[in-house]
Amino acid sequence: MMYRYKLIEFQGNAYLADLDYHRLLPVDELVRDVFERFESDAEEIVSDLAEKYAESEIRNCLHYLHWPQVQSFSRALEAPPLKIFAPRLRSTHGDLRWNTLGASVAHIELLKALSKYATIHVTQEFEEMENMILTPFNIREKSSVSRMIKENYDGVLLWYLDEFEMMSVLNYLHVPVVLPIYAARGDNGRITNGMMRWYASMRSFDAFMTLTQPTIDLYSTFIHDTSLFHIVPCGVDTEFFQPENKGQAKQKVAELLDRPEITEKPIVGYISRFQVEKGASVFMDVARLMPEVFFLAAGPIEESYRYDFPENFLHIGKHPREELPILYNACDLFCFPSIACSEEFGLVVLEAMACGTVPVVSSYDGPKYVVKDAGVVVPAMLYDRDMTGLGGGILAENFAEVIAELLQDDSGRHKLAEKARQRALELTWDNSAKCLLRVFQELNAKKRLARQRARMPIGFGLNENVGGSVKPKAMIINAIYEGNTPLTGTLYDTSVEEGIALSLLQNHSLHEIEVILSYLLEDNEAVEEQLDRLKGFMRALF
């Protein structure tokens, strides 16, 4: 087995030869002193150099060199973990403790879980920075982009769909790029159009990270190559979100809110942004239909708007994340009547399930996938296109009927609560991170098979048939080098559409060519056939 680093000297300067990434790294005196002691374990090195350097500097150096806890000359250095770049071009959230934007929470938790298996280079500071390296980055500065490209990352994990500036570096960054899809459609078509822009730019070893299968089903109606989509579901911290005694949880919440009636009635909870697309108005209507039940809502709310809350309804505003487990546990049922087009998953539903609270959700893609048979899915009327961010309609009466049945069936509700907890144990952040890690490994394998752009001359002309008709044609002109013919002839006739596609392959991706063929042929089956022919042809070439 080969050592990752080798210390060498050249023209009076010291360098570490990085044998994994095939580069020379200039080193300072600290790195040299550390590396010269590689026969010692980490603690011995820290002790030996304590008088010369600060302990934090020594440990950072050991971390950079991926130093094992016990290291000897006879043992080869272990291969480093994957090195992932996770840039964020603009910040859309503040303190995670008060963050209620599911996509931001999900992405941050995923990065934290992924950092156990890979080194993550981030562009903004996290509360827990273990195995994360703060790397300043400005997409508008050429020097910054150049440094990023030279880092030899094993992958790039973007944040959001609308960071289109990163498209400009795809031609120079020969590493897999993964784009998470936290909203599959909505915003008056903006999200779908953005997805199409990314699809046309992506290479064979890039990918979309989707949270559920329905997203792939949706986009299979627009595009031919769904192999770019990889499912990496969200997760939940099942130690932080775990079941507690409901009676005690209700007592705690009653004291926290100074509302003693909370302990006297069944509680139906709702934790999300209090907005129309999240089903806030439906939740209020359900409360109006069930005056004998207490309805508790938490999350950001437009304070300037006057809400007509029923007497059995309490909105408690935003609460920090450390208080969410007790709120989930105090609820007998968790109601999530979201009809948002952007409801790709439903993270709050999974958090409630981890606390052993039975969910009642609308039959929308994300929450329906999360719940499966561990709760109740209420049928919704789904739209084929969004209306101002709404993906469908739902009846409060249907939710009220389901909630009434569950509250009257203690045995059935307790069985569903156990199922909910078991379902949550399947969807942990650790499992999500491992799933994403496999995606990056698969993409890097694809990258090794990626070919350079085809370079072959294509000619166009007219061809007279036996009947006297003249039709346009394209010709593949076989180049002959020193008598060696790569193909068996010198000229090959083909269709004009195929000739155009082969010409475009020299500077464009198959996904971009798919757009051109869709315009020229206007027949999805013909487009798919042409693309399959092109793929097979390109795979056969040297």
Image (spheres, helix red, strand yellow):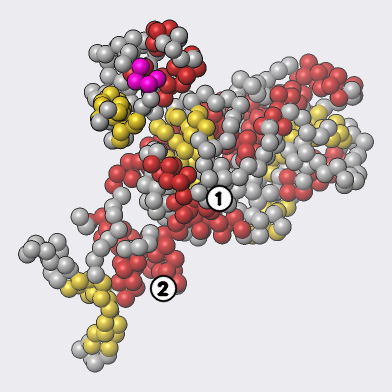
Image location of residue 84, percent across then percent down: 45, 36
Image location of residue 299, percent across then percent down: 77, 36
Give the residue at x 58% y 40%: 369
Image location of residue 100, percent across then percent down: 70, 36
The one of 413 and 268 positioned closer to us in this rendering: 268
31 inside magenta stretch: yes
Q: Residue 521 carries which label?
A: 2
Kindly tell me whether residue 354 is visible in this rendering: yes
The image quadrant of residue 382 is bottom right
- Quarter of the image that includes the N terminus: top left
Q: In this view, does 521 lie to the left or right of 221?
A: left
User: Disc 2 on helix, strand or loop?
Assistant: helix
Give the residue at x 14% y 61%: 486
**Prevailing secondary structure of the magenta residues:** helix
Give the residue at x 58% y 35%: 124
* Label 2 environment density (alpha carbons within 10 Å; few <14, some 14–19, many ≥20): few
Q: Image height check: is 268 above or below 53?
A: below
Give the residue at x 26% y 13%: 73
The one of 249 and 78 positioned closer to us in this rendering: 78
Q: What stretch is highlighted in magenta?
A: 29-33
How far apart marks 2 and 1 lie (CA) works out to 32 Å
Q: Image height check: is 3 above or below 213?
A: above
- Quarter of the image that includes the C terminus: bottom left
Q: Residue 163 carries which label?
A: 1
Q: Image height check: is 405 above or below 242?
A: below
Image location of residue 536, percent across then percent down: 27, 58
10 inside magenta stretch: no
* Label 1 environment density (alpha carbons within 10 Å; few <14, some 14–19, many ≥20): some
